Amino acid sequence: AQQLVESGGGSVQAGGSLRLSCAASGYTYSNYCMGWFRQAPGKEREGVAAISLSGSLTYYADPVKGRFTISRDNAKNTLSLQMNSLQPEDTGIYYCAARRCYTGSWTGTFADYNFWGQGTQVTVSS
């Protein structure tokens, strides 16, 4: 069965950094574009970053541009999110997700993701 497992969450002070990881299994990882999402308490889930099949193309939500970096390793079936200059408003549960896509069809989008991980908590204190 398709499975995504996030790790790397934790508590940090404002200005600090965290690196999230997502381990994928049960499907052909290189056939899926990947994304990171987050959900803050009392808010809807929102897209954070997305990456193409090869990893050469990325897309970021405006609030995280210049601070977060998404990357993937297709040999290891892993996805990462490096988060720098963290702020209290970055607090939330972070999820990785997979979206079926095809070579040459990349669009930066947070829509139409097919399956999700269980999430990892990130807490940033001021």
Image (cartoon, grey):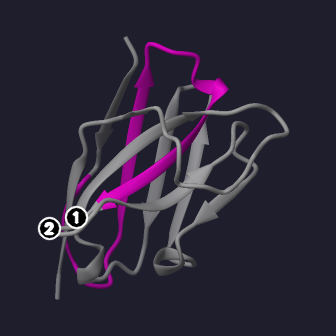
Residue closest to the eye, 3 or 106: 106
Q: Residue at x 42, y 74 (%)?
A: 84
* Mark 1: few/some/many CA within 10 Å (<14, 14-19, 20+): many
Give the vertical position of 76 relative to 50 (above or below). above
Query: Marks 1 and 2: CB-CB under 8 Å?
Result: yes
Residue closest to the eye, 108 or 29: 108
Q: Name the residue tied to disc 1.
A: 92
SS class, disc 1: strand
Q: Is residue 124 left or right of residue 50?
A: left
Q: Name the residue tied to disc 2.
A: 41
As for residue 122 lying within the magenta part, the answer is: no
Q: Quadrant of the C terminus?
A: bottom left
The quadrant in which residue 124 appears is bottom left
Residue closest to the eye, 12 or 62: 62
Q: Residue at x 22, y 64 (%)?
A: 92
The quadrant in which residue 21 appears is top left
SS class, disc 2: loop
As for residue 32 lying within the magenta part, the answer is: yes
Q: Residue at x 60, y 55 (%)?
A: 109
Q: Of the two numbered discs 1 and 2 on the same chain, state the one appearing first in sequence.
A: 2
Q: Is residue 107 left or right of residue 122?
A: right
x then y, percent, for residue 107: 72, 52
Disc marking residue 20: none
Dominant secondary-structure state across the stretch colored magenta? strand
Residue range of the region highlighted in magenta in the rendering:
9-38
Q: Is residue 89 left or right of residue 35?
A: left
Q: Quadrant of the N terminus?
A: top left
Three-letter code for the amino acid on which mark 2 is drawn: Pro
